[in-house]
Each structure stands twice: as structure tokens, then as C-alpha cells.
Amino acid sequence: MAPSLGTLDIGPVGLWTSSGLWTAAGDEMTDAAAELDDLGYGALWLGSSAGDLAPHESLLAATTRLVVVTGIINVWTNPPALVAESYQRANTAHPDRMLIGLGSSHAPLVEAEEYRQPLTRLRRYLDELDAVDPTVPTNRRVLAALGPKTLTLAAERSAGAHPYLTTPDHTVEARQIVGPSVLLAPEQKVIFESDPATARAIARNTLSQYLQLPNYTNNFLRMGFSPDDLEHGGSDRLVDGLTAWGDTDAVLKRIAEHHAAGADHVCVQVLTSGDRHAGALPRQEWRVLAGALGL
């Protein structure tokens, strides 16, 4: 059964980027966003989104079809009333093109808060959000989810789950947990580089930060990686499991594996040798991927 997003359509493949990439793009933002619209991607996911949705509204204004998704808004630092108000404003101006991703983030990223019982906090946040009128409807929000309990909450209280930094095997398990009618949209990192040493160096440059976050390292262990795989910037096994590198066929193969495992939508994050926050938008890689996908 197809997931119910009402009249909102994100298609089978979207792009995942950090919000910082678009902030750094400056005047290029409008042109690049319009090109993504033309290339046929279903959605653009913005990591570390703020509840005011300022860059999201700029991207919506620069496009006519693309769905913009927050991937994610931190529930510890963004009041539900702000998120609901911002969503309503964006949705009024650009109907059926805004999807709100929410998540409990990570202890080192939550300032001036005591990071305890993140699942309880996420559940309470949804209660508070539902109490706002008008709010973000259930079918216009998804939850960042890795473990079984959060995946279950995503199925119960939102349109679906957005697992980040996982494998197709995790997608199989996530689908079993959330059931057949809930949106499942995993993120997948890809690198258009066929030299193993170069590709893995690019991957480790990004993965290094996640190896400091228990939410991810615990999930890596749940997925079958060993403590040794987490040492020294990540083993080749870990890097190759979490990133797809090589030519377009290698990248397409990994995306297809997620779909075969039960994903409705795959959020593709293109990594390059540039800094992941301040580097140039990987527009050429986006064009190559769109062509290979036949969008």
C-alpha cells in the first residue's frame, strides 16, 4: 500500500543536503533550486533545519514543483508553536510542497538543555504540536528514526520515518516495524569516485562527526557492525556499508537496494572532496545522477 501523504508527492528519489550548503550558495541558490526542479527530483531535504523555515521558503519560491523537507528540525530547540506557524505560512504560499521532519537530535548538539529520555521528549513534543491550532497535520510530518521504538512512534504519530546513515538491511527491518502503509525515506550517501582510497577518504571526512554521536554508533552496532569497525575513522567495511561510491552504476545499485528493501523514497546525499558545509553545491553530480535515474 502506498504511503498516505494526501496530495503531496515526493517521488521515489530526492536529494539530501545540509542547510549550510544553501546558506553558503548566496545568489546561486535560486538558479540551483530551479535546476533541481527541472531535473525532476521529487524532494529536497535540508539537514539541521531551523523552525522558522526561512531558507525553505526561499527554495520553495524559486521552484514550482519541488517538495522541500526539513531533515530535521530539532525538537529540543524549536518551539512547536513556531514550527506550526512557519509551516502554515509556507503551505499557504506553496500548497502541498512542504514536509516537516522532526527529531530528537543528539546530546552534543543540544545547548542549555539536559538531554534525557529523547524518545519521551519527542513524544511530548508531538503532543504539544497537536495542541497548536492550526498545526502541522500528521500527514505532513515525518520523524527521524533509527531504533525500533522511534520507528514505531513514527508509524503511530506521523506520515513516516526518515532513517539517516543506515544500510539497505536496516531498511528491511524498518519496513517490518513501520508496516506497509507508512512512508519510509532513508538517507543514502553517495560519492562519484572510483578510486577506493580517495572515495573512502571523502567518506571518512563526513563520517567522523557521526562516530562521536552515541545515537549513531549504537545503531551501527545494532546493524551488525563491531566496535572495531568504529575505530580509527571507521573501517572499510563500515565506510562501504554506509556510503555508495564508484561510478553511476554503483550508486544506482545502492539506491535500488533500498527500494527493494522497502523504501518508498531514497534521500541521496552527494559527498564531494569539498567541505560539507561551505563547499560548492555539487550541481554537476546532481545532473549526472538525474540523468542516470532517468528522471
Image (spheres, rainbow, N blue to C red):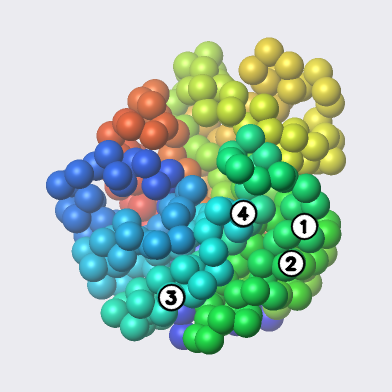
* Contact check, label 2 and label 3, Cβ < 8 Å: no
Q: Hey, what amino acid is under mark 2?
A: Arg
SS at mark 1? helix
Q: Nearer the viewer, mark 1 or mark 4?
A: 4
Of residue 56 and residue 286, the one placed in the foreground of this image is 56
Horizontal arrangement in the rendering, residue 203 relative to residue 14 (left or right): right
- Mark 2 or 3 closer to N-term? 3
Distance of label 2 from label 4 (alpha carbons)? 12 Å
> Where does the image place residue 106, in percent across and percent down from the top left?
66, 42
- Between discs 2 and 4, the one toward the N terminus: 4
Quarter holding the C terminus is bottom left
The 10 Å Cα crowd at callout 3, few under 14, some 14 to 19, many 20 or more, is some
Q: Are marks 2 and 4 in contact (CB under 8 Å)?
A: no
* Mark 2 to mark 3 CA distance (whole Å): 20 Å
> Reading the chain from its start, which is encountered first: label 4 or label 3?
4
Considering depth in this image, is 178 or 256 the residue closer to the camera?
A: 178
Closer to the chain start, of discs 1 and 3, is 3
Whether residue 180 can be seen here: no
Against 104, residue 58 (above or below) is below
Query: Residue 85, which numbered label?
Result: 3
Q: Which residue is mark 1?
A: 119
Res. 81 visible in picture: yes
| Residue visible at 81% across and 31% down in the picture | 225
| Residue receiving disc 2 | 123
Q: What distance separates the C-alpha of mark 1 from that of mark 3?
A: 24 Å
What residue is disc 4 on? 76
* Of the image marks 1 and 4, the number of the one nearer the N terminus: 4
Dot 1 surroundings within 10 Å: few (below 14), some, or many (20 or more)? some
Q: Nearer the viewer, residue 40 or 70?
A: 70
Q: Is residue 288 above or below residue 267?
A: above
**Amino acid at circle 3:** Glu
